[in-house]
Image (cartoon, rainbow, N blue to C red):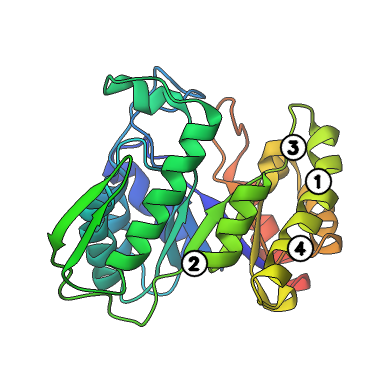
Amino acid sequence: MRFGITILPEFGWSEAAPLWRGAEEMGFDHAWTYDHLVWAGLPDAPWFGTTPTLIAAAMVTSKIGLGTFVTSPNFRHPVTFMREVLSLDDVSGGRFLCAAGSGGNLDSNLLGGEELSMKQRMDRFVEWSELLDRLLREDHVTASGTYFEARDARTLPGPIRDRVPYLVAANGRRGMRLAARLGDGWVTMGQGSAEEERWASLPALVEQLEVALQAAGRDPDTFPRYLSIDASGYALRSVDFFEDRVGRAAELGFTDVVTHWPRPSDPYAGDRATVERVASEVLPRWR
């Protein structure tokens, strides 16, 4: 099992930098931040830009993976986002992880325009993913779609490695097929609102993913699977609760779990001492 922690981009850098360093020092495998203009969970909180935050995090760490959990097409064009991906990959020395999903309407509506249906958001996400995939593999890219265009887009210098990992957040069959076709991993938090409802949804979602992977000719046994374990109750409320969640995730075949850095109040209310105990006691047992 690999372990990740999400640090919300709500802090000024003098306060945030020690958190990112701490995540690496404690032995987490990857650290993430949200990619929103406004997050519905903290609509009145301070909020900083994702790319500058991850660039700064790369400068104060050296080993930990760094990523978006998750980005979306809501305010990201594949051509301009490709430039940010290349910069993040370069500055981090090949540690950037790009997790993306179809996105909701809150960020999108801030920029005006028509509200999209669930089907339209998924159509847009598939188109966005396909174009971003081309932009990270090719030069002189031209494409014309329903939502995005590129006209002889230059992509030099390209990523510093053969492939920037692209992780697809999905809970439906179309998303699973996209993950199986283009993705380097799958991200989910389960479906439903209640804690046990989300856990109960996971076996069927895992089965859908495995069917999609087999249809795409990919090996389900080697495909990374990331579970946001706080969606079914904040995992770092206690050491025992965290370990219980990790065990349940492992039984379902997840390779990675992602929690959140504790905050002084909800959501994710907790304390650093619990994170430190989890890092020293739980992480070594599950590796």
User: Does 272 sit left or right of 72 as displayed?
Assistant: right
Q: Give the residue displayed 76% in from the left and 63% down from the top.
A: 211
**On the image, numbered disc 3 is attached to which residue?**
232
Residue 281 pos. (x, y %) = 74, 64
Q: Is residue 264 above or below residue 83?
A: above
Tell me the SS state at disc 3: helix
Front of the two marks 4 and 3: 4
Out of 128 and 44, give the one closest to the viewer. Answer: 128
Residue kind at label 4, given as amino acid type:
Val
Distance from disc 4 to disc 3, alpha carbons, whole Å, reads 25 Å
Return the residue at label 1.
241
Mark 3 in CB contact with mark 2 (< 8 angstroms): no
Instruction: Give residue 129's position: percent from left, percent from top.
Output: 41, 55
Q: Quadrant of the image for the N terminus?
A: bottom right
* Quarter holding residue 269: top right
Q: Which of pointers 3 and 1 lies earlier in the amino acid sequence?
A: 3
Q: Residues within 10 Å of mark 2 (few under 14, many from 20)?
A: some
Instruction: Report which residue position mark 2 lands on.
Output: 25
Residue 167 appears anywhere in the view: yes
| Mark 3 or 2, nearer chain start | 2
Q: Residue at x 32, y 55 (%)?
A: 54
Q: Earlier in the sequence, mark 2 or mark 4?
A: 2
Label 1 residue SS: helix
